[in-house]
Image (cartoon, coloured by chain):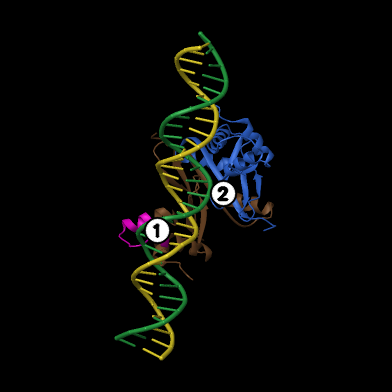
Chain colours: A blue, B brown, C yellow, D green
Amino acid sequence: MSRSNPRVLSTLERAGGFASAQEVYRLMQREGESIGLTTVYRALQSLVNDKIVDVLRRDDGEAIYRLCGEAHHHHLVCKGCGDTVEIEGGAIEKWAKSMAEEHGFREVGHTAEVFGLCSKC
Amino acid sequence: MSRSNPRVLSTLERAGGFASAQEVYRLMQREGESIGLTTVYRALQSLVNDKIVDVLRRDDGEAIYRLCGEAHHHHLVCKGCGDTVEIEGGAIEKWAKSMAEEHGFREVGHTAEVFGLCSKC
DNA sequence: GCACAAATGAAAATGATTTTCATTTCCATG
DNA sequence: CATGGAAATGAAAATCATTTTCATTTGTGC
């Protein structure tokens, strides 16, 4: 079941740990690696499932993948240049938990993302 | 140049100020309004340009539009039955704001959603 | 070697969004 | 009331990322 193709992972690393599936594919082609686009997509999905990479969205909707640490964190993304900063989210954890409890929900998870224009944009 | 079709805006309002282009289109159709999908897209783009609506992305990459300045709320969604509860997010607003300030970001927005299993599931 | 599961990838399908282009609606002016 | 051009409209085609299908290849244990 582990389709986390190591060549895809290593290419993503070489790309600066931040690229779309199409970019990873083109990069591997340019480097002479023989691989299909389908496999790149599957490998990236696998890596996301295994929580080895994170997936975000560009403004145009294209999914971009990036290596991430295991600690649960959130992102502050610049709408202009796509620059991303990891931010601490202790407040959110508590908020999500208390809101869920209040309404009798179990097995609680959450998503949260902050976006804006960074100082350079 | 102002293609900010008022019927599209009013439909977006009626949708709770939060919907994708396709949803706005389907909603208008269901209500018997005669309009083309193309026009809905153009109107929404126009509204974004005029800063009357904000655009975000769903996890699947679909663009969703929401009225600017609308007092926005967050959702607690059940993974089992899809039931949704609106929850208060004062804590998030503060968190997003302070995180953004800390990193020199302007024009800050955020998304946040909590999910889990409701008491019935 | 042989069978069988997993991996692969080419091609087709999907679905949102954009573009093209012919037609219609508006509006000012003769 | 024309009428002429600019803006708006929308159906259909094009685009593009992503997913699915399915036939083929690869790998592994027997």
- Is D4 rendered above or below residue B12? below
Q: Which residues are magenta?
A: B25-39
Q: How many marks?
A: 2
Element under label 1? Answer: helix
B113 w.r.t. B121: above or below: below
Residue carrying label 2 = B92
| Residue B67 horizontal/vertical position (percent) | 48, 60
Q: Which residue is mark 1?
A: B37
Question: Which quarter of the image is occupied by the C terminus of chain A?
Answer: bottom right
Closer-to-camera residue (B61/C18): C18
Chain-order first, disc 1 or disc 2: 1
Secondary structure beneath disc 2? Answer: helix
Q: Disc 1 vs disc 2: Cβ atoms closer than 8 Å? A: no
Q: Residue B8: give its label.
A: none
Residue A60 lies left or right of residue B105; in this view the side is left
Same chain for marks 1 and 2?
yes
Seen in the picture, residue C10 relative to B7 is either above or below; the reply is above
Q: Chain of mark 1?
A: B
Residue A65 visible at all: no
Q: Main secondary structure of the magenta part?
A: helix
Quadrant of the image occupied by residue B41: bottom left
Q: Is residue C1 left or right of residue A34?
A: left
The CA distance from mark 1 to mark 2 is 35 Å
Looking at the rendered structure, the kind of residue marked 2 is Ile
The residue marked by circle 2 belongs to what chain?
Answer: B
- Between residue D26 and residue A98, name the one nearer to us: D26
Residue D11 image offset from top left, x and y in percent? 35, 59
Q: Amino acid at mark 1?
A: Leu
